[in-house]
């Protein structure tokens, strides 16, 4: 079953029963403009449920209130689950090699490279021998830990970097992830991370500029280096079409995880939700 408008979406298997949530792992993806959660049946290894909520907010306080209201009014997300994980989307962050990392200097390193929202966290990117330092609003962190005190937490960037490394081929590939009017662009050369950056966009021309700028900075040719897309982008929308005018070697990211999708989730493009489908593997 699928219900909802553009800002609210529910997709679930006909076999899903809300009174059996202890048979499921709950994955939550939280941003300043959206909240998505999925339920993975830990016996069948099948995603049977997905719900997404998009919202607008003028500031972090309003964002916190909308997340609080959504959780309070959602009976399903407050049930007991086998386990829970949460990822933060579009965090202000910086990557640093382990050889240069000093935990006592994490705040100063983040402040130098990005905006600090007040609460600093550190994720280990084991596959790249590096750390990602990021910040989230204190109030939102406190809110989520109140409702989900036993959850495991991670940045979305860690999940994506680990997934890209896992699927990376023996060549150079650029990945572009679209969410909440931001584009996260990452380049891998074989299994090695070359560059990872974030850009906020308002128009399709902004997207084209940032992607071509990323190619130029790495001295790569759009006619040769493959661009792989996922997230909030479709083959028929203007954002894809303007990229395709300049980059012909372009495709959508495929899901290679061992987890299955229920029949209703198979009806929507898999590349839309690959990040949350693979969250459980990286937290």
Image (cartoon, rainbow, N blue to C red):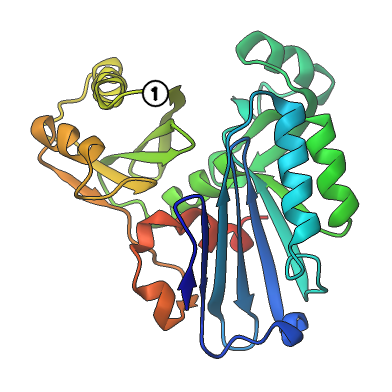
Foreground of the two, 256 or 269:
269
Task: Please say if 20 is above or below 195.
Answer: below
Task: Please say if 255 is above or below 178.
Answer: below
Q: Quadrant of residue 125?
A: top right
Q: Position of residue 72 (x, y in %)?
A: 81, 56
Q: Residue at x 85, y 44 (%)?
A: 143
Q: Quadrant of residue 55?
A: top right
Foreground of the two, 238 or 5:
5
In this rendering, position of residue 219 left or right of residue 155: left
Q: Residue at x 46, y 68 (%)?
A: 257
Q: Position of residue 202 (x, y in %)?
A: 37, 23
In this rendering, position of residue 241 left or right of residue 263: left
In this rendering, position of residue 81 left or right of residue 219: right
**Camera sees residue 215:** yes
Q: Position of residue 236 (x, y in %)?
A: 19, 49
Q: Residue furthest top?
A: 112
Q: Position of residue 78 (x, y in %)?
A: 80, 66
Q: Quadrant of residue 48?
A: bottom right
**Circle 1 is placed at which residue position?**
201
Image quadrant occupied by the C terminus: bottom right
């Amino acid at each position: 079953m699928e219900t909802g408008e553009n800002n609210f979406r529910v997709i679930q298997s006909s076999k899903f029963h809300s009174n059996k949530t202890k048979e499921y792992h709950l994955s939550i993806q939280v941003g300043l403009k959206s909240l998505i959660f999925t339920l993975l049946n830990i016996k069948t290894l099948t995603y049977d449920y997905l719900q997404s909520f998009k919202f607008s907010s003028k500031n972090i306080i309003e964002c916190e209130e909308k997340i609080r209201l959504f959780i309070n009014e959602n009976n399903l997300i407050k049930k007991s689950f086998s386990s829970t994980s949460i990822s933060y989307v579009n965090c202000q962050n910086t990557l640093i090699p382990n050889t240069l990392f000093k935990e006592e200097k994490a705040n100063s390193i983040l402040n130098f490279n990005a905006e600090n929202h007040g609460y600093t966290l550190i994720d280990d990117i084991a596959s790249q021998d590096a750390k990602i330092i990021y910040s989230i609003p204190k109030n939102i962190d406190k809110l989520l830990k109140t409702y989900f005190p036993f959850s495991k937490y991670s940045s979305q960037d860690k999940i994506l970097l680990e997934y890209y490394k896992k699927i990376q081929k023996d060549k150079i590939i650029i990945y572009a992830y679209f969410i909440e009017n931001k584009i996260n662009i990452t380049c891998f050369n074989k299994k090695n991370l070359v560059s990872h950056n974030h850009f906020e966009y308002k128009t399709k021309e902004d997207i084209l500029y940032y992607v071509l700028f990323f190619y130029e900075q790495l001295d790569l040719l759009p006619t040769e280096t493959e661009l792989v897309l996922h997230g909030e982008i479709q083959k028929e929308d203007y954002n894809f079409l303007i990229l395709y005018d300049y980059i012909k070697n372009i495709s959508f990211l495929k899901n290679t995880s061992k987890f299955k999708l229920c029949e209703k989730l198979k009806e929507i493009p898999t590349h839309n939700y690959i990040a949350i489908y693979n969250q459980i593997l990286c937290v």
